[in-house]
Image (cartoon, rainbow, N blue to C red):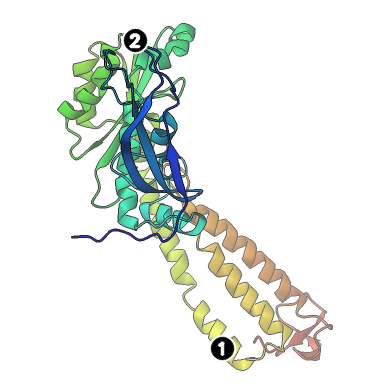
């Protein structure tokens, strides 16, 4: 059996109902028993909270067995959990607004809040958040009333969020024109039958649907045709462009690999420079190391579909660094570094005609 978690000495907070008298017979309510008591961890601190239950003491009252409880106490906690509602909302915000992973959410809470929470329990509270979100999304007509009044109907979008490994996929039904969330559910399998069940509450609400936007997944197309027959179904242009750009993306990726292979000797140049000048006394060594760092940073670009091609930016960056190095070679050195080069009266082959240059500098 798992032992109870020990929090030490924490503040004791008790809540009584906001109602002082029975709403049916106007008799003063009397304390009956604690509805629940537990330690709640919130973003602002840890406290042992007790919700006190009150009843009407009047025997003749028809609602004498009704237990009244505090709304403030219920707003602080989630049934069956020792974490406050603010923790659940914070986890949902980090996941779906800032797109953090489970590990990143856990590290954020561990660093910026007093609560004790395991990484695995972050997933449990995320499911609580989704349940609360879904429970608050029943009245579809009221949420889209302004959009219907302005545009004559709504445009529905259906898409699934790629889950972390081992988790269910989150599917979201969204109204495109206003951005309102009309439904959400975690689905183990995104079959046409399950997706149709996610779309059906929108049809039951009787809201006019002008169109549906989604990707070309077959189960989505079948679900939309079942729930919204005759409604225009537009395939997402971003998904179409992403698939169309796949061949160019692969070519760009191979080009980036080739650019990195061309610079594989940078490690040897850096090692030779550091061995020759371990104390960093030669300013020319700093120039060489800066150039190596600039080249490495240039090839670390990352692209994204459909049209963010990293290799093109890398080639432009390498060309800019190369032009800088070429200008340095044309100059041939500087008199400000007498210890980093040997002044020759003869021109260097890389320098401008009839111009003296530093040669045999420590950078080679």
**What residue is shown at x 44% (from left), y 49% (from top)?**
47
Depth order, front residue of 268/181: 181
Q: Which residue is mark 2?
A: 207
Mark number, residue 272: 1
| SS class, disc 1 | helix
**What residue is shown at x 49% (from left), y 72% (from top)?**
263
Q: Position of residue 20 (x, y in %)?
A: 44, 23
Q: Position of residue 89 (x, y in %)?
A: 43, 40
| SS class, disc 2 | loop
Mark number, residue 243: none
From this view, report whether residue 271 is shown above or below residue 300. below
- Apparent side of residue 286 relative to residue 215 in the rendered image (left or right): right
- Apparent side of residue 173 relative to residue 268 in the rendered image (left or right): left
Depth order, front residue of 339/351: 339
Q: Earlier in the sequence, mark 1 or mark 2?
A: 2
Q: Position of residue 284 (x, y in %)?
A: 71, 83
Tell me if I can see residue 349 in this picture: yes
Instruction: Please rate how many residues cluster around mark 1, counting C-alpha atoms within 10 Å: few if below 14, some from 14 to 19, many from 20.
Output: few
Q: Position of residue 155 (x, y in %)?
A: 38, 18
């Amino acid at each position: 059996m798992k032992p109870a978690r020990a929090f030490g000495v924490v503040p004791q907070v008790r809540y009584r109902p906001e109602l002082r008298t029975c709403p049916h017979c106007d008799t003063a309510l009397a304390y009956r028993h604690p509805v629940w008591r537990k330690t709640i961890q919130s973003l602002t601190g840890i406290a042992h909270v007790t919700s006190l239950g009150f009843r009407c003491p009047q025997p003749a009252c028809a609602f004498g067995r009704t237990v009244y409880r505090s709304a403030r106490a219920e707003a602080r906690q989630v049934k069956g959990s020792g974490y406050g509602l603010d923790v659940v909302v914070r986890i949902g915000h980090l996941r779906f607004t800032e797109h953090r992973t489970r590990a990143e959410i856990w590290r954020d809470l561990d660093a910026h809040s007093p609560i004790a929470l395991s990484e695995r329990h972050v997933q449990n509270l995320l499911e609580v958040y989704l349940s609360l979100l879904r429970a608050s999304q029943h009245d579809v007509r009221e949420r889209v009333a302004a959009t219907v009044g302005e545009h004559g109907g709504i445009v529905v979008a259906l898409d699934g969020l790629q889950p972390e490994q081992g988790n269910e996929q989150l599917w979201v039904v969204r109204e495109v024109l206003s951005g309102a969330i009309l439904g959400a559910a975690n689905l183990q399998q995104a079959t046409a039958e399950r997706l149709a069940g996610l779309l059906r509450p929108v049809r039951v609400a009787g809201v006019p649907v002008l169109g549906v936007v989604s990707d070309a997944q077959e189960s989505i197309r079948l679900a939309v045709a079942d729930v919204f027959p005759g409604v225009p179904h537009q395939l997402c242009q971003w998904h179409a462009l992403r698939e169309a750009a796949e061949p160019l993306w692969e070519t760009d990726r191979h080009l980036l690999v080739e650019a990195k292979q061309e610079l594989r000797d940078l490690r040897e140049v850096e090692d030779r420079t550091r061995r020759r000048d371990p104390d960093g006394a030669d300013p020319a060594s700093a120039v060489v190391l800066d150039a190596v760092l600039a080249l490495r940073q240039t090839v670390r670009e990352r692209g994204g579909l459909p049209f963010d091609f990293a290799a093109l930016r890398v080639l432009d960056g390498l060309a800019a660094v190369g032009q800088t190095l070429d200008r340095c070679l044309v100059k041939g050195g500087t008199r400000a570094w007498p210890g980093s080069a040997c002044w020759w009266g003869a021109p260097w082959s890389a320098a401008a005609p009839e111009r003296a240059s530093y040669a045999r500098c420590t950078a080679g």
